[in-house]
Amino acid sequence: MPVPQSRGLVSRSLLRENAYQALRDAIVDGTLTPGERLNDSDLVAWLGISRTPIREALGRLEQTGLVRTKPGRYTIVSPLDLRAARGAQSVTAALHELAVREALPNLSAAELDAMRAANTRFAEALARNDVDAALAADDAFHGVAVTASANQALRAVLEQFTPVLRRVERLRFSSLSGRGSVAQHDRIIELCAAGDVDGAAAATRANWETLAPLLDALPADEHEHEDVEHQD
């Protein structure tokens, strides 16, 4: 398994959470590629921590669908698969719609300004083909309503399923197919500013549903991977 050259990446505090975030981000940004085998010794060397928090982090990643394991055999980065991505899209679209419904009655002018600023950064990132910055700005844009909703259960579920979609969105934002999101964001802001709860909620759901063409292009999931078995 080739790992990044930087070592000792994770501080001694919050080892479990930091290991999870480092591995999750490496999977989402493609540093750790679909189907790549994950070896404990390589991860220990890369992150600079012991095996225990790494194994705990891998367990969490398996629950989110980013990692697959077969005890005593292998641990791999999950391939992009259609069923998991569609399930994640359904959940995230519904929850972002709910976030807007719960946030909008009390959404402040400062929060609307934060959405506008995030969308400006988003447009600029797309213009220069900076996928990482585009994803960060998109997170910030949608995160305004999520935070304003003050719904911790909603946030927790989104944190579980959003990384699955972010792997797909990297494909969208690296191509022209993501450019339409800027105008969709502007429309969401306009409806929020007008106090149109139903309209803003529907526009938000529609924005998340624009991933459908990319999801349709993904291969169907195959739970039995012959090539993985041959790695033993």
Image (cartoon, grey):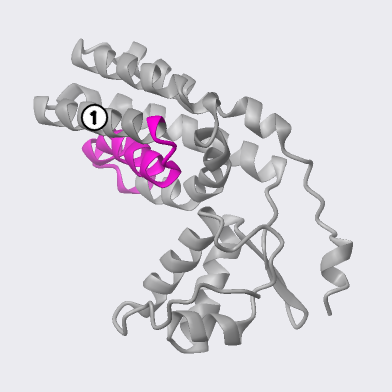
Is residue 44 depicted above or below 19 in this figure? below
Please tell me how crowded label 1 is: few (under 14), some (14-19), or many (20+) other residues with Cα within 10 Å. Answer: many
Drawn side of residue 142 relative to residue 44, left or right: left
Residue placed furthest toward the left: 109
- What amino acid is found at the position of numbered circle 1 in the picture? Met
Q: 181 and 63: which one is in front?
A: 181
Where on the picture, by quarter, is residue 20?
Answer: bottom left
* Quarter of the image that includes the C terminus: bottom right
Q: Is residue 130 magenta?
A: yes
**Which residue is identified by label 1?**
115
**Quarter where residue 126 is shown:** top left
Q: Position of residue 89 (x, y in %)?
A: 56, 35
Left or right of residue 126, residue 193 in this image: left
Residue lying farthest front?
128
**72 on left or right of 102:** right
Q: From this view, report whether residue 74 is shown above or below residue 95.
A: below
Residue 198, position as x, y percentages in the image: 35, 13
Q: Nearer the viewer, residue 55 or 150?
A: 55
